[in-house]
Amino acid sequence: AKPTATVSTLYPIAAGPDGLRRAVEELCAQAEQAVRDGAEAVLLSDFREGGRTADLTFVPPLLAVGAVHHHLIRAGLRMRASILVETAQAWSTHHIACLVGYGASAVHPYMLWSAVRFLYESDKSAKMREQGK
């Protein structure tokens, strides 16, 4: 397995209006350090075990991917690592295509998979499958 580093895109909402800028700067610095330390894949993630809390928010995934992508280019490191995204904010093919267009090599839309599983397992879906619909 290739060395991978996970960088959280979550930050405290109490950081106020300047918090997003600082969170993006920190995200870029952490991604750069991970690549310098040998990571061949950097996973940008808004996942939090147990779910998010009211005191956390996230850097929008398009902003996170674009910022890290261009930061690594400027640092001369972009070709050393892939950028992966784990996000609840991608639920359509368009969202995923945009993330790839901004520099992501792969996207794990974990909330999309949870929603599909929930709908598939619902009573209504089971009845429709039984009826051949």
Image: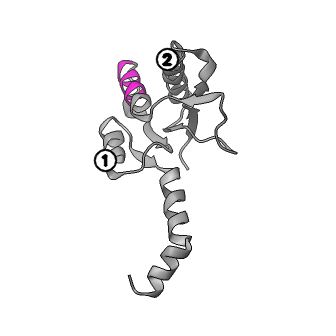
Task: Work out whether 76 lies above or below 104.
Answer: above
Q: Secondary structure at mark 1?
A: helix
Q: Which residue matches tag 1?
A: 94
Residue 83 falls in image quadrant: top left
Toward the top, the furthest residue is 18
Image color mode: one colour
The residue sitting at 48% across, 50% down in the picture is: 108
Magenta residue span? 66-74
Specify the principal SS of the magenta part: helix
**Residue found at the far right of this picture:** 50
Question: Closer to the N terminus: mark 1 or mark 2?
Answer: 2
Find residue 25 and name its label.
2
Q: Residue 110 got which mark?
A: none
* Mark 2 closeness class: few <14, some 14–19, many ≥20 residues within 10 Å: some
Q: At which x and y percent is residue 18? A: 51, 12
Q: Per the image, is 68 magenta?
A: yes
